Amino acid sequence: MATNRNSEHLRYRYGICLNDNCLKCKNKEVQQISARKDFVCEECGKPLRECPPPKSGPNKMVIAAIAAVIVIAVGVGCFLGFSGGDTPESTPVDSLNVQSDSLSQSSDTVTVVKTDTIKQIDTIKIEKTVEKVETPKTTKTTTTTTKTSKASGTAKGSVNLGYAKFTGTVSGGKPNGQGTMRFTSSHVIDSRDPKGRVADAGDYVIGEWVSGKLVQGRWYGSDNNVKGSIIIGM
């Protein structure tokens, strides 16, 4: 036996972890470490304090359990011998089985309640996410320009006047040069026109404007037929 212990000691080293936060230290577990490896704890990696190997032999807990089983078996045998083998005495065993079944059912009930609670939490999260949907509306500018002339300050673009849209040369947000005025609703072509001619929706005028006033142009209907010439002047 001494020879076997010495050979085993050469192949393995035994130690106890001193780290209070380590589970193996709390359980006072004797760790078997190969002689080729570092002599540290397998759980936390801290150095071990060397100790003699654990003694081999029958486990005291196992012996105690076997003894308890033997005592119970002897007691049951004596009880059955005195009672004469009557079956009614087996009722307590059945009642224990019923109680164990009821305990298992209660545990199932607890599991169902936890599952329902989780589903309710998920539903609340979805409702909060749906509330954050609205986005502000963007507005469009009514005046657009493309090329700008440095000399005159005019530019090619368009102006939305509400009743009509002008496309051509623009200066200061007003028609100022050659372009086309296309009417979107019925409106007087120009307030300075002595004849007070009114364009219908879809009509358009191709001509020349100065500071938003029509100087001269040709008036067309929505069917592209000429309705007349307009000369107002400056």
Image (tube, rainbow, N blue to C red):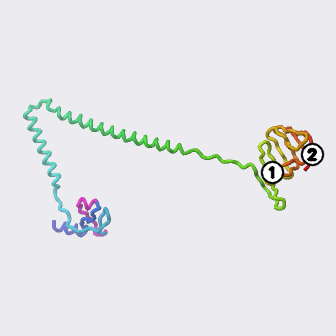
Query: Type of residue at label 2?
Result: Ile
Q: Judge by depth and name the residue closer to the eye, 200 or 232.
A: 232
Judge whether residue 30 is colored magenta: yes
Residue at 24%, 61% (x, y): give it: 29
Q: Residue at x 16, y 58 (%)?
A: 57
Confirm whether the magenta stretch covers residue 93: no
Please name the residue shown 85% across and 49% down the image. Answer: 179
Choose the circle earlier in sequence order: 1 or 2.
1
Give x and y (percent) for residue 175.
82, 50
What stretch of residues is rendered in magenta?
23-37
Task: Name the residue nearer the viewer: 11 or 136.
Answer: 136
Is 65 positioned to the left or the right of 218 in the image?
left
| Mark seen at residue 231 | 2
Give the crowd class for mark 1: few <14, some 14-19, many >=20 residues within 10 Å: many
* Vertical order, 97 against 60 (above or below): above
Seen at 66% across and 48% down, the residue is 138
How crowded is the residue under tag 2: few (<14 C-alpha within 10 Å), some, or many (20+)?
few
Vertical side of 144 occupied by 4: above or below:
below
Amino acid of disc 1: Lys
Q: Position of residue 142 (x, y in %)?
A: 74, 48
Q: Which mark is residue 5?
A: none
- Residue 6 in the image, given as x and y percentages of width and height: 20, 69
Query: Left or right of 124: which side holds 54?
Result: left
Seen from the viewer's position, the closer of residues 66 and 143 is 143
Residue at the disc numbered 1: 174
Q: Quadrant of residue 4?
A: bottom left
On screen, residue 92 versus residue 231, left or right, reads left
| Secondary structure found at label 2 | strand
Quadrant (top left, top right, bottom left, bottom right) of the N terminus: bottom left
Q: Nearer the viewer, residue 36 or 184?
A: 184
